[in-house]
Amino acid sequence: MEKVVYWFRRDLRVRDNWGLIRAASRGPVVGVFVWDSAVVGRAGRFGQAFLVDSLVQLREEMRRCGSDLVVVRDLEELEGRQVVCSDEVGVFESAEADRVGAELVRQDFLVDYDWRKLPGIFTKFRKEVEPLGAVQVLGVPELRGWVWDGEECLLDQLAEEVSIVELMMPPGLRGAAWRGTWFFSGLEPVPVSVYKDTRNGFDGWNSSSLLSSYLAWGCMSVREAAAEVRRCEDLYAANDSTYWFILELLWRDYFHYLARQQGVKMFLREGIQGLELDWSGGDELYDAWCGGWTGYPIVDACMRQLAATGWMSNRGRQITANFLTKVLNVDWRMGAEWFERNLIDYDVASNWGNWQYHAGVGTDGREFRVFHPVKQAAEHDPASEFIQKWLPELAGVSAKEARIPGAHCDVVVDFDEAVGVNRSQYLARARNSKAGS
Ligand SMILES: Cc1cc2nc3c(=O)[nH]c(=O)nc-3n(C[C@H](O)[C@H](O)[C@H](O)COP(=O)(O)OP(=O)(O)OC[C@H]3O[C@@H](n4cnc5c(N)ncnc54)[C@H](O)[C@@H]3O)c2cc1C
């Protein structure tokens, strides 16, 4: 039997890994991770630090299963070998798999769906796939290894090359198991069963699941997460929260299928709608947004949290993406790139898909939805604890004062005026584009 390389990409686990199971059925397997691949290139300093530790843990697991994991610098090392890998979405990711002639195995999805038929609206997709039914999780395959005969680089050396950052969550398989245990069985009430009430938190371990980094790097599969929800439902009861959590996992599937369907359009300025907008906001506004100096406290607190930790909540991502595009009128792709460079849980489909959605050029209808930063802060951070944590210059003022634009620095634009101008532009262009299509 021929020696097989299982090329790990964003599926850093041995359990419930379809690709690894396929590779094991072909012959003796060694796992390889390519450091200079699109996957690593797209990860920022937090992502890379998370990745190195996750690889160390994956290597331990592969050895326990009778094989090994090696890390190589160059994709060339895979050329001419029998390579199996997961069919990751992303233009560069696909090109790399083609280059080494890899056998592609279906990527980690919760539901089976023909992406060619994917509707442009999430709700339609959701209705088609519901009810979901049982979720099957595959076990750990039996592996036989072989001794790697190419160049390899040492994980210790990589650990020295990546930036030293403090990770807010423990990486890898152990981190995934730890956080999964907390979320699906830790406390009373079990966090997943109150998820609908906690999911909009900005900060802290008691808000949403914080599983995204494990899902994005594949330390946990999406089906493992869904199967845990089903287990909780059997043990306790199904409720709105358990339903809502699965719904969020479906958003992930949706954006991944969308990326497969739309290919390069995921990255175009006019988005998948082909809507040409005049993104007139310049570098100064963009820099103020990145650095957390727009003068809008909730926006700045979220942006500073991201820069310091590599993490931002879903609520924070919505507010800041909406602010960059609808208020500052800055090209949404610059925001997507900033998130790409900073998020630990960066995932090409979820990031670029969500950004398009908020910029109004993606899957959302052609409306101009605005998140008001003061109202958002009042609703989701009523005591201004989060704002004051990340903007210490506001410590000591009342919760209400801490939300007021200009409280910690001058505002870069007037909210009402900017929104008025940008809304008119957007609606006029959307009308013309509809008339022309
Ligand atoms: C502008 C923008 C950019 C984003 N970029 C990313 C990204 O690069 N990587 C990423 O994983 N998520 C991204 N998201 C989606 C979402 O914000 C994060 O998945 C979520 O905040 C992660 O926290 P959690 O694990 O606690 O989520 P939970 O609320 O606990 O949700 C559970 C899981 O469902 C999935 N999920 C939840 N919401 C979404 C969504 N809107 N789209 C896709 N999947 C979702 C994630 O895998 C998440 O871990 C982005 C959202 C926005 C608005």
Image (cartoon, helix red, strand yellow):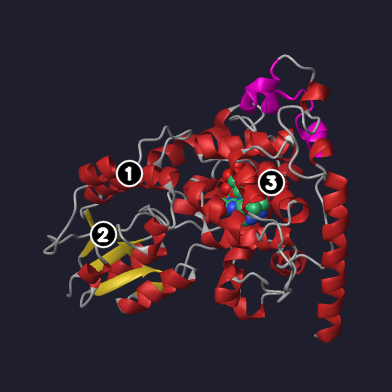
> Which residue is depicted at the point 68% across and 42% down?
316
Q: Main secondary structure of the magenta part?
A: helix
Label 2 residue near ligand 1, CB within 8 Å: no
Mark 1 vs ligand 1: CB below 8 Å = no
Q: Is residue 80 left or right of residue 418?
A: left
Q: Nearer the viewer, residue 254 or 46?
A: 46
Say which of marks 2 and 3 sits in front.
Answer: 3
Quadrant for the C terminus, please.
bottom right
Q: Residue at x 72, y 14 (%)?
A: 396
Q: Is residue 189 visible?
A: yes
- As drawn, 7 above or below 415: below
> What amino acid is labelled 2 in the image?
Gly
Query: What residue occupies the far bottom of the structure in this picture?
Result: 436
**Residue 272 figure quarter:** bottom right
Disc 2 versus disc 1: nearer the observer: 1
Q: Which mark is residue 320?
A: 3
Q: Say which element carries label 2.
A: strand
Q: Is the CB atom of the residue marked by disc 3 within 8 angstroms of ligand 1's nearest atom?
A: yes
- Residues in magenta, as a range: 376-395
Which element type, helix, strand or loop, lies under badge 1? loop
Residue under pointer 2? 31
Alpha carbons under labels 2 and 3: distance apart? 39 Å
Whichever of labels 2 and 1 marks the residue nearer the N terminus, that label is 2
| Residue 379 counted in the magenta span | yes
Q: Is residue 361 left or right of residue 379?
A: left
Please tell me the numbered disc located at residue 162. 1
**Quarter of the figure with residue 329:** bottom right
Relative to 404, is 67 on the left or the right?
A: left
Q: Do the CB atoms of the residues marked 2 and 3 lie less than 8 Å apart? A: no
Cα separation between marks 2 and 1: 22 Å
